[in-house]
Structures are given as structure tokens and as C-alpha cells.
């Protein structure tokens, strides 16, 4: 029997668990960034306060920075399945799916919208209880202002992820207070990473490596050559061009799904079989890890594990509903985008290769990213991850921008304008040009960006 599936359905919500009605599970207040109290590391800075948002069950992420954010969709997991947004709305499936693919999307959405429980494999340490908890704005599969924390030690310019102390990703919650992770005193660097929107990721996955590599040497307004993130894909075992995550650390959705299950929720799976030990403490791990690994098992009825369902959902999720520039301002803004060198990195569109899913095959992807790493100078988060250096970040896709505030990898920018002004390193010439634009040119550019 699939114990996790059974256990999860039969168990209480994490809210009940937190209240101690079902077990001694302990949800660190770090989940609510506005009241980080006990979980707050000594290294956290004022920014954490600024970023503070109550992400409690019933609350929408607050309206920020002139964006048109809609209230987050919330459903009671375990009751009725989440409703599926209509075509043209955020969170809808791709157009042109077969009936079987529609079903995969529906099953995937359901899995993505579930909360894990300790009895079902959550923890011992984790960041949140379900994928949808951090990917929910303006619809399930979207972004959120929830940040995760990374730490490490930098000695003579060399980054050490402090693996043996539970780095570089901090898990802010635990199923028992005794397993609670903290940023260790050895850490000299703490960085925050914001949850990104997952709309259209199937299209990004379907872009061939050669297409991304082809973007490395192309004519640009400024000298901004990017670097492909060559990673080892845990699913195929092959060397691939990474494209998911702020550092392009994963190449496929299934790999990211497995990674997120183990690192965000503490659910081990066939690609990531080992639990994270709380601050590297194997004794504490042994004490609190009661469910046999891998916790996520293939369900014989469907031939799929939870990581597969979540990957299906993301793969079949439509891109953000964007428009082509229509008004005079929007059209003028699109020209400013080119002439200011934004398109040097934010490549307006790429094409997918042939794909077994017709809805993903040979399609235009208007993502506004070259999916390459760029040296962003002081904007980089300092964390060395896979092939990315501390200052290298993946060009953030700009589609869906109007609903994904706050901006940049740590959400430091409340508006698009502030995000552009924070560009540094290879993007500095472009940023300087933006700052010197005439007021009406800048306004036109921002209007164009709001169409994406
Ligand atoms: C605690 C909040 C949190 C939870 C829970 C969470 N994520 Fe994320 N997700 C993030 C953050 C933060 C990032 C950016 C991470 C980075 O690049 O370091 C991210 C990025 C991603 C990406 C890459 C998106 C892109 O545009 O490149 C995928 C895919 C993803 N998450 C899938 C999942 C899945 C599947 C689950 C559930 C198993 C999940 N996430 C659970 C916070 C979360
Ligand atoms: C050298 C490459 C490069 C150039 C040139 C560049 N960008 Fe970026 N852009 C990036 C990278 C990399 C990020 C992600 C940085 C981070 O968050 O650390 C980013 C992030 C952004 C974001 C935030 C997106 C989000 O979801 O948080 C916006 C908005 C943006 N860029 C707009 C622009 C505009 C407009 C221009 C032209 C004036 C421009 N960029 C020029 C590389 C570039």
C-alpha cells in the first residue's frame, strides 16, 4: 500500500498539527516571515522585516508595488479538488491537450495542492507543507513572496556551502522542536531566494539545449555574453543545459520536482533518497525520521509517484496570459527594450523542439530570457551552486511580470523600476542607459513590460 498517500488523506492539516491536536509536530514561526522569532538567525538583516508577509492559510499575498496581483487561490486540501482555471486565465492548462493529458494535468494539480504530514513523510526538517504553499499567486502554480534561505561561509573569496552543517539550504521548520535547524554560527553569508512562478515551464523544458547554446554568441547591444549552466540531470544521468531556478540549477521538471520534494518538504523520492539531517546532525535525523525512504513511492494503479504528478502539472501549465504590444506606448516601449540592451539577455522568444506532447512541440515561447547565467556583480547572491558562481544569476524570464512582484531573486525590489535599477555587473551598461532614458521613454518601457 502507498503509505504516504493513505496517511496523508487520513490525517489532519498542518494547522491542526501545529496546534498539537494530532501529534507533537512543530511548525517553526519562520513560515510566517512576519513573526520569525525563534527561527530567526542572528545573521538575518532588516530586509527580512521588510519582506515580511503573513503567508497564513487564509491570507492573500498583499498587493505590492503597483502590480495587479489577484488574491491567492486557497482551497482546503483533502476536501474537494482545486478548480481548474479557464483558458486565458493564470493557472490554466496548455491549449490543445488530449483527454489523457488533461487528466494528467488534473491529477498533477491535485498532488501539487496537497499538504504533507509528518506521518506521510514530511520532514524531519522542511520549509513548507505543500508545493502550492509557495507557488500560489495569482493562481496555483504561481509565485509568492515567500523566500527560502541559503547560507555558507566565504573564506578568501571561496564559498563553502557548509554541507556538513546542513547547508546551503536552510529548512526553517521541523516536525519536532528538537530537530529545528538554525543558521550555524560558522555561516558568514546568508542569502534569500524568492519563490518563482511555474507558468509555462513545460515550454521552457521543451526548448532544446542547442537553442540555448545558440544564444551564447549572438549580436548584442552591449558585451554581455552569457554562460550556459551545464548540469548533470539526475533523471537521465546526462549532461544538460540547466534552465530552472535562479541559478539554472536543474534541466528538467522531474529533477526539480524530486529536488523540491526532498529539500522543501523533506519527502525523499527515487532521485533524492537521503533526508537532510538537521544542521548535519545524523543522530537527530535518526531520532525523528520515522518513515522509510524513499517516502514517495510509485502508485501501482497509476505507475506514477507524487514527484511525477507534480512534474506533469508543471509541464502542462499554460504560460502567463500575456498580450502583444498594442498601444503606441507599448510599441514604443518594445523598441526601447531593444535599444537599451535589455533584449541582450532577456531574449524575447525561443522555439521548442519536437515534443511528444503536441501542445509543446515546435511552439514559440515568449519568455524574455536567454536562460543563460550572467555575472550580475553585486546583485548576485554570493552562493556558488552547480556551475554558477556567486555573482552569476540566470536571466529571469519576464513573462507574467505584472503579477509576480516583488522582484529579483530575493524580492528586494518592490517595483519593476527598482528591479532594473538594481542591475549591475554585465547588466550595468544597460541599466545606465535605462536610468538616462527620457521620462516618456521609461514610462513606455514599463508599459511594454506590463504586457508580458
Ligand atoms: C518553501 C517554499 C517552497 C515550496 C514548498 C516549494 N517551492 Fe518551488 N521554489 C521555491 C523557491 C524559493 C524557488 C527558487 C529556488 C532557487 O532557484 O533557488 C522555487 C523554484 C521552483 C522551480 C523552478 C522554477 C523556475 O522558474 O525555474 C520549480 C520547478 C519548483 N520550484 C517546483 C516546486 C515543486 C514541484 C514543489 C513541491 C514539491 C515546490 N516547488 C515547493 C519555493 C518553494
Ligand atoms: C546582462 C544581462 C541582463 C541585462 C542586459 C538586463 N537584465 Fe534584467 N535580469 C538579468 C538577470 C540575471 C536577472 C535576475 C537577477 C537577480 O534576481 O538576481 C534579471 C532580472 C530582471 C527583472 C526582475 C525579474 C523578476 O522576476 O524578478 C526585471 C524586471 C528585468 N531584469 C528587466 C530588465 C530590463 C528592463 C533591462 C533593460 C533595461 C534588463 N533587465 C537588462 C539579466 C539582465
Image: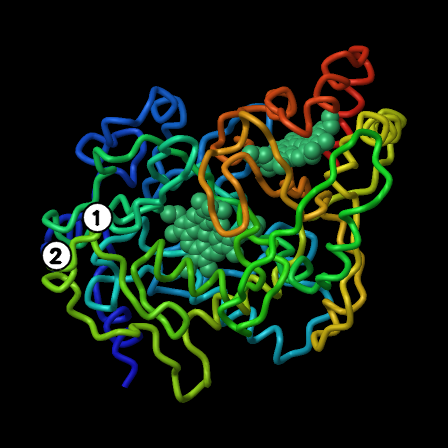
For the point 38% across and 38% down, the residue is 59
Residue occupying the far bottom of the picture: 300
Q: Is residue 76 above or below residue 414?
A: below
For the point 35% across and 64% down, the residue is 79
Q: Is residue 104 above or below residue 79?
A: below
Give the position of the N terminus as an image quadrant: bottom left
Residue 430: image x %, image y %? 74, 24
Residue occupying the far front of the picture: 156
Camera-side residue: 356 or 209?
A: 209
Q: Residues within 10 Å of mark 1 (few under 14, many from 20)?
A: many
Colouring chosen for the image of the structure: rainbow
Residue 452: image x %, image y %? 73, 40
Q: Which image quarter: residue 433?
A: top right
> Could you tell me if residue 73 is visible in this image?
no
Q: Which mark identifies residue 284?
A: 2
Element carrying mark 1: helix
Where on the image, by quarter, is ligand 2? top right
Q: Residues within 10 Å of mark 2 (few under 14, many from 20)?
A: some
For the point 63% across and 20% down, the residue is 421
Q: Is mark 1 within 8 Å of ligand 1?
A: no
Residues at marks 1 and 2, CA–CA distance in whole angstroms: 9 Å
Label 1 vs 2, first from the N-terminus: 1
Q: Are marks 1 and 2 in contact (CB under 8 Å)?
A: yes
Residue 116: image x %, image y %? 30, 62
Q: Which mark identifies residue 279?
A: 1
Amino acid at each position: 500500500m502507498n503509505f504516504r498517500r493513505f496517511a496523508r488523506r487520513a490525517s489532519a492539516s498542518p494547522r491542526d498539527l501545529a496546534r498539537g491536536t494530532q501529534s507533537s509536530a512543530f511548525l517553526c514561526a519562520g513560515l510566517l516571515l512576519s513573526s520569525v522569532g525563534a527561527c530567526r538567525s542572528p545573521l538575518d538583516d532588516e530586509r527580512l522585516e521588510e519582506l515580511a508577509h503573513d503567508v497564513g492559510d487564509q491570507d492573500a499575498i498583499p498587493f505590492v508595488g503597483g502590480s495587479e496581483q489577484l488574491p491567492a487561490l486557497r482551497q482546503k486540501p483533502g476536501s474537494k479538488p482545486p478548480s481548474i482555471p479557464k483558458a486565458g486565465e493564470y493557472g490554466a492548462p496548455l491549449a490543445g491537450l488530449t483527454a489523457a493529458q488533461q487528466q494528467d494535468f488534473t491529477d498533477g494539480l491535485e498532488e501539487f495542492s496537497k499538504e504533507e504530514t509528518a506521518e506521510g513523510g514530511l520532514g524531519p526538517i522542511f520549509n513548507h507543507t505543500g508545493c502550492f504553499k509557495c507557488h500560489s499567486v495569482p493562481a496555483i502554480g504561481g509565485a509568492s513572496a515567500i523566500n527560502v534561505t541559503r547560507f555558507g561561509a566565504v573564506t578568501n573569496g571561496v564559498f563553502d556551502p557548509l554541507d556538513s552543517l546542513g547547508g546551503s539550504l536552510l529548512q526553517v521548520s521541523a516536525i519536532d522542536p528538537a530537530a529545528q535547524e538554525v543558521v550555524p554560527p560558522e555561516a558568514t553569508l546568508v542569502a534569500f531566494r524568492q519563490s518563482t512562478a511555474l507558468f509555462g515551464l513545460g515550454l521552457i523544458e521543451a526548448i532544446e539545449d542547442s537553442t540555448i547554446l545558440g544564444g551564447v554568441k549572438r549580436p548584442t547591444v552591449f558585451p554581455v555574453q552569457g554562460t550556459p549552466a551545464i548540469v548533470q540531470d539526475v533523471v537521465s544521468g546526462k549532461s544538460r543545459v540547466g534552465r530552472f531556478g535562479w541559478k539554472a540549477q536543474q534541466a528538467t521538471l522531474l529533477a526539480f520536482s524530486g529536488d523540491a520534494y526532498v529539500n522543501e518538504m523533506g519527502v525523499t523520492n527515487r532521485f533524492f533518497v537521503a533526508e537532510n539531517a538537521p544542521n548535519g546532525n545524523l543522530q537527530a535525523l535518526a531520532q525523528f525520521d520515522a518513515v522509510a525512504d524513499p517516502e514517495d513511492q510509485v502508485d501501482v494503479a497509476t505507475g506514477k509517484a507524487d514527484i511525477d504528478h507534480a512534474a506533469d502539472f508543471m509541464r502542462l501549465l499554460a504560460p502567463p496570459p500575456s498580450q502583444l504590444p498594442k498601444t503606441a506606448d507599448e510599441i514604443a516601449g518594445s523598441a526601447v527594450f531593444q535599444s537599451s540592451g535589455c533584449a541582450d539577455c532577456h531574449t524575447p522568444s525561443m522555439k521548442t523542439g519536437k515534443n511528444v506532447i503536441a501542445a509543446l512541440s515546435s511552439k514559440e515561447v515568449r519568455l524574455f530570457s536567454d536562460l543563460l547565467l550572467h555575472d550580475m556583480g553585486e546583485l548576485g547572491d554570493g552562493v556558488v551552486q552547480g556551475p554558477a558562481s556567486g555573482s552569476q544569476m540566470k536571466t529571469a524570464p519576464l513573462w507574467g511580470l505584472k503579477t509576480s512582484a516583488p522582484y529579483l531573486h530575493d524580492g528586494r525590489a518592490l517595483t519593476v523600476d527598482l528591479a532594473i535599477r538594481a542591475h549591475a555587473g554585465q547588466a550595468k551598461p544597460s541599466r545606465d542607459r535605462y536610468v538616462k532614458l527620457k521620462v516618456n521613454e521609461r514610462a513606455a518601457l514599463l508599459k511594454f513590460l506590463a504586457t508580458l
